[in-house]
Amino acid sequence: MNILTVGAGFVGATHSAVLASNGHNVVAYDLDDKKLADLTSREAARIDSRIYEPGLAKLIQQNETNLAFTSYLHGINPSSIDIVFLCLPTPAEELERQLEKRCLYVAAKQVAEHFATRNEGRQEKHLLFVNKSTVPIGTAATLSDKLSEWGLKNYGVGSNPEFLVEGKAVEGSQKPDRVVIGTTTEQDDKLLSKLYGNIDSNRIKHCSPSDAEAIKLLSNFELFSRIVLNTYHVIGRLCESRPDLDIARIVEGITADSRLPKWGHFDSLYAGGSCFDKDARNLLKTLLSCESSSYAVSFVNDVIQGNDAQLAHFYSRAQKQARFNFEGKTVAILGTAFKQDTNDVRMSPAIPITKWMIRDGVQTIRTYDPQASENYAKTFNDKRIIVCKDEAQALEGTQAAIIATDWPRFKSLSPLIEAQQRPYLLMDGRRMLAPNYQDLVSKGIGIIAVGSVPMFPER
Ligand SMILES: NC(=O)c1ccc[n+]([C@@H]2O[C@H](COP(=O)([O-])OP(=O)(O)OC[C@H]3O[C@@H](n4cnc5c(N)ncnc54)[C@H](O)[C@@H]3O)[C@@H](O)[C@H]2O)c1
């Protein structure tokens, strides 16, 4: 099939590359010329520097003949396209300011007007617009009305929400747990089913566009609430208050029950990334308009607030439990991506932590991340922040280190931490050094870790 993807970010680039690798002809359209130059360079290092997703660069390189990137919409022959996928940002600010779907509609309008010229304006060819962005429930119906207002004819609108997990986006798109196809006609359902013909049909869930939009929001909320309320606030607070509890053993014991998933029991200071918080706010807005939803509203609200509270609590433990005052100190932040295997810093815990340390008078922040340093550095323009080439350089001359991302390589940090001056505080937001805590404490390092009581050397 001939596919146009609109938006070549994490979702659009991955979706385009995977569809191309399945034999479809794909053109990815985006406004960002710098991003497109990196993606079209076909050089792994340049692609990775723009969108770091394991396997993505290789897939783009392998599918040079049937995967194109462009910022020139009018260069695309509208009569040749079967499906248009919208993979556009739907930022929280647009939701907050009642401007939801703005970017989506701006782009959709440009594309619709171009496609209204297909078949010399006769628009004989049926065209399917499919939204992959995460949107408020009912967006497909609104979009359908708008497409008509913008002069489009002979089209369908579907919802095929994206469930990819950053860091595993390619793998997850090639072998998805499920593909949700929300359409209003049999014709469109058949078209999308054919597109995903390589996927086990049991994994394809057919529904209406509104159902599909709701499935996305509710799935993310189920995951988010499990992490925040159960893992962070119930299990976490308990284990951080009682020296007689060991969080790893407790999680092992709980999840031995075959009814309970292991997923969600993360050692973490914050559930970051572009989706959880935003999607929960999106859901909250819809729930506010539902009847008798006060418990649901307070539950969703608690999860949103609880996530922020987890990070604030972690940071405050430095002062409250270790009497560590950031004023005038040099501190290392190890990990600025919101999680391992990505260079995405959206809703990364390192960003609020950096702001709080600056507010609290830190003298210097030394940071290192294997992939996300550049994106993190762009967020700040502050001479106090020094981006380093590796962990050793980041730790030079520091009085404390904060591990904020679960990059596996941080598990080997103990010798570097041991080599620091005393007194020294390690704040382990991911329990990366958990097997070494006792040893580090015996060597004079103070430790604040998520899921543990504070550990200090004997004075
Ligand atoms: N990143 C994820 O893990 C993930 C997972 C599931 C769903 N989603 C959802 O998918 C959507 C896209 O997310 P993303 O992470 O790919 O965002 P992104 O910011 O990485 O990519 C969006 C792209 O759209 C482009 N764009 C913006 N306006 C445009 C326009 N008018 N015309 C053409 N291109 C335009 C931007 O330049 C950017 O490259 C969002 O709704 C997000 O919530 C994201």
Image (cartoon, helix red, strand yellow):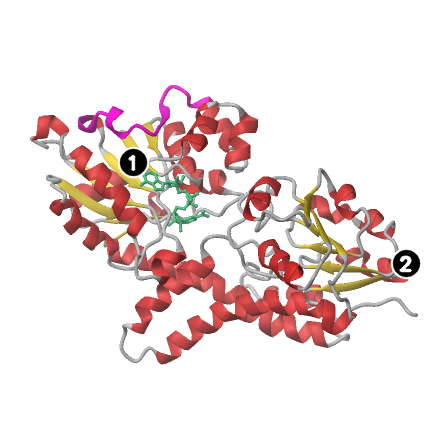
> Local crowd at mark 2 within 10 Å, few (<14), some, or many (≥20)?
some
Q: CA distance from mark 1 to mark 2?
A: 59 Å
Secondary structure of the residue carrying tag 2 is: loop
Sequence-wise, the earlier of marks 1 and 2 is 1
Q: Is residue 57 left or right of residue 65?
A: right
Q: Which residue ends up furthest to the left in the rendered image?
A: 122
Q: Position of residue 16 (x, y in %)?
A: 38, 33
Q: Which residue ends up furthest to the top in the rendered image?
A: 65
Q: At x 71% / y 76%, what residue is drawn?
A: 241
Judge by depth and name the residue closer to the eye, 224 or 122.
122
Residue 443, disc: 2
Judge by depth and name the residue closer to the eye, 125 or 332.
332
Q: Is residue 357 above or below residue 394?
A: below
The answer to whether any part of residue 40 appears in the image is yes
Instruction: Name the residue carrying label 1.
Output: 195
Q: Is residue 125 left or right of residue 343?
A: left
Q: At x 59% / y 74%, what residue is drawn?
A: 234
> Local crowd at mark 1 within 10 Å, few (<14), some, or many (≥20)?
some
Secondary structure of the residue carrying tag 1 is: helix
Q: Which residues are magenta?
A: 62-79
Residue 305, disc: none
Q: Position of residue 175 (x, y in %)?
A: 44, 41
Q: At x 20% / y 46%, what residue is drawn?
A: 157
Please, what is the three-letter code of the amino acid marked with disc 1? Leu
